[in-house]
Image: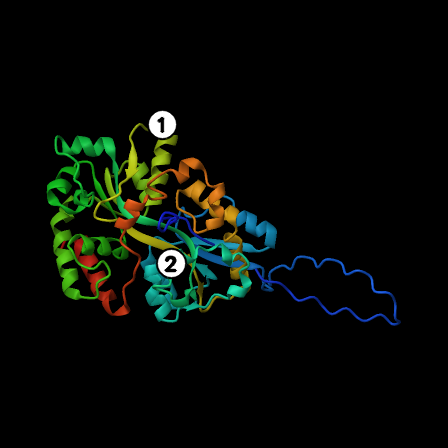
């Protein structure tokens, strides 16, 4: 998200080329004894004449060598750009002629993009690794993408509260940590104390409003404007305590700009690793709120006006290889969407309960969902009023 990614009741997950037909061989001029047929060479994927692929993804959300390895194997030049949130991606798609062949929307947000005809169907016959996808997991995506026609998993995780343990404990003084971690950022008696060391929110309506709605006892993907009023009133009470609306959460956490943050689980773990690498002593951790973290599933999709569709399918299929799924988890701390990759994931990643959740924490997660175009205006108005402090 930035976000730059469940085997355990949803944990482990996913991911899928096509071949050219052989030219017919001319019959021999005269009858001769037939020689044994040579094994057919492995067929490669059909590629576009122009060996280019344009990708639009979240920052810090790709393994170190994936692009270079793909370019070397297929002879395709990858142009790789990044966006900060789903809203920025949506604006690019709605404007048309985005120039991108693959984009990485969050599944819930992609619902209105699918409904609006902004994506073309995936040709699954071109994805030889599609069988690596976990069918139970895919059924969750089918809730926003019926029959899994348009979206292929990239990675998943959950939006949650993260903290710098030492700084939060100091700011709270003798006050114990709340049972529900969302209280730290949504309840004034806690947020007013954490103001001293900084609270940061992801700068994204589609991340903040679902958890705010859930916190006030309303459906996280409500279509009722009255529910948004209640969420907005709750958020207004803590606005004065929020230091930062962040689109660079990893850097902001690692740089010490906040001690409590609403962020993506993987990004919080990445920031924690950076602090350790630089010799920092503070412990950065994503919490598992009893009130539920917000599941996100980021996916690959092909815009309707993509110009290198065959190359896009080749990239998707390449990503769905087991080795690439394992690298996503090992390098970026996001659960892979590839069930075949599990054997190659490091034990310290598999056993990290903030990456691969236990059954109890999984059961608390707020399921993935999305908002219709009809409520989008209310969503944005509520968020912008909160951000402006009005």
Q: Is residue 81 visible?
A: yes
Task: Quote the CA–CA distance across marks 1 and 2.
Answer: 35 Å
Q: What residue is rendered at 16% in x and 47% in y?
A: 186
Q: Secondary structure at mark 2?
A: loop
Q: Is residue 308 visible?
A: no
Residue highlighted by disc 2: 105
Disc 2 residue crowd, few under 14, some 14–19, many 20+, Cα 10 Å: many
Task: Please tell me which residue lies in front, 234 or 360.
Answer: 360
Task: Please tell me which residue lies in front, 129 or 118.
Answer: 129
Q: Position of residue 304 (x, y in %)?
A: 44, 69
Q: Secondary structure at mark 1?
A: loop
Q: Position of residue 59 (x, y in %)?
A: 39, 49
Q: What residue is rendered at 83% in x and 65% in y?
A: 34
- Left of 295 or right of it: where is 224? left
Say which quarter of the image contains residue 278.
Answer: top left
Q: Quadrant of the C terminus?
A: bottom left
Say which quarter of the image contains residue 49.
Answer: bottom right
- Left of 90 or right of it: where is 37? right
- Left of 34 or right of it: where is 112? left
Q: Position of residue 127 (x, y in %)?
A: 53, 60
Q: Position of residue 325 (x, y in %)?
A: 47, 48
Disc nearest the viewer among 1 and 2: 2
Q: Earlier along the polypeptide chain: callout 1 or callout 2?
A: 2
Disc 1 residue crowd, few under 14, some 14–19, many 20+, Cα 10 Å: few
- Residue 277 higher or lower than 203, as above or below: above
Residue highlighted by disc 1: 279
Task: Please tell me which residue lies in front, 119 or 359.
Answer: 359
Say which quarter of the image contains residue 41.
Answer: bottom right
The label shown at residue 29 is: none
């Amino acid at each position: 998200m930035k976000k730059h990614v469940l085997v355990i009741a949803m944990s482990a997950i996913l991911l899928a080329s096509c071949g050219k037909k052989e030219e017919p061989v001319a019959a021999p001029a005269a009858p001769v004894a037939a020689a044994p047929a040579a094994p057919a060479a492995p067929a490669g994927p059909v590629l576009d004449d122009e060996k280019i692929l344009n990708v639009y993804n979240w920052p810090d959300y790709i393994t170190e060598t994936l692009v270079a390895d793909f370019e070397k194997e297929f002879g395709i030049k990858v142009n790789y750009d990044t966006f900060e949130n789903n809203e920025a991606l949506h604006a690019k798609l709605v404007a048309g002629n985005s120039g991108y062949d693959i984009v990485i929307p969050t599944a819930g947000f992609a619902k209105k993009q699918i409904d609006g005809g902004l994506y073309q169907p995936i040709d699954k016959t071109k994805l030889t690794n599609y069988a690596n996808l976990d069918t139970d997991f895919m059924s969750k995506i089918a809730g926003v993408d019926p029959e899994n026609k348009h979206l292929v998993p990239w990675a998943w995780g959950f939006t949650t509260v993260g903290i710098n343990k030492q700084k939060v404990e100091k700011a709270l003084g003798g006050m114990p940590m709340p049972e529900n971690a969302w209280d730290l950022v949504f309840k004034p008696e806690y947020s007013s104390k954490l103001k001293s060391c900084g609270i940061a929110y992801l700068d994204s309506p589609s991340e903040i409003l679902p958890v705010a709605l859930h916190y006030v006892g309303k459906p996280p993907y409500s279509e009722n404007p009255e529910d948004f009023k209640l969420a907005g009133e709750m958020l207004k009470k803590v606005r004065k305590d929020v230091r930062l609306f962040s689109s660079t959460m990893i850097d902001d956490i690692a740089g010490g700009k906040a001690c409590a943050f609403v962020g993506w689980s993987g990004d919080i773990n990445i920031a924690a690793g950076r602090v350790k690498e630089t010799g920092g002593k503070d412990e950065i951790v994503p919490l598992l709120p009893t009130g539920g973290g917000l599941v996100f599933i980021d996916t690959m999709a092909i815009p309707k006006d993509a110009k290198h569709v065959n190359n896009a399918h080749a990239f998707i299929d390449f990503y769905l290889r087991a080795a690439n799924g394992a690298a996503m988890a090992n390098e970026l701390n996001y659960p892979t969407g590839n069930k075949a990759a599990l054997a190659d994931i490091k034990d310290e990643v598999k056993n990290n309960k903030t990456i691969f959740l236990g059954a109890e924490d999984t059961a608390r997660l707020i399921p993935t969902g999305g908002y219709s175009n009809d409520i989008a205006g209310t969503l944005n108005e509520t968020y912008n009023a909160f951000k402006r402090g009005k």
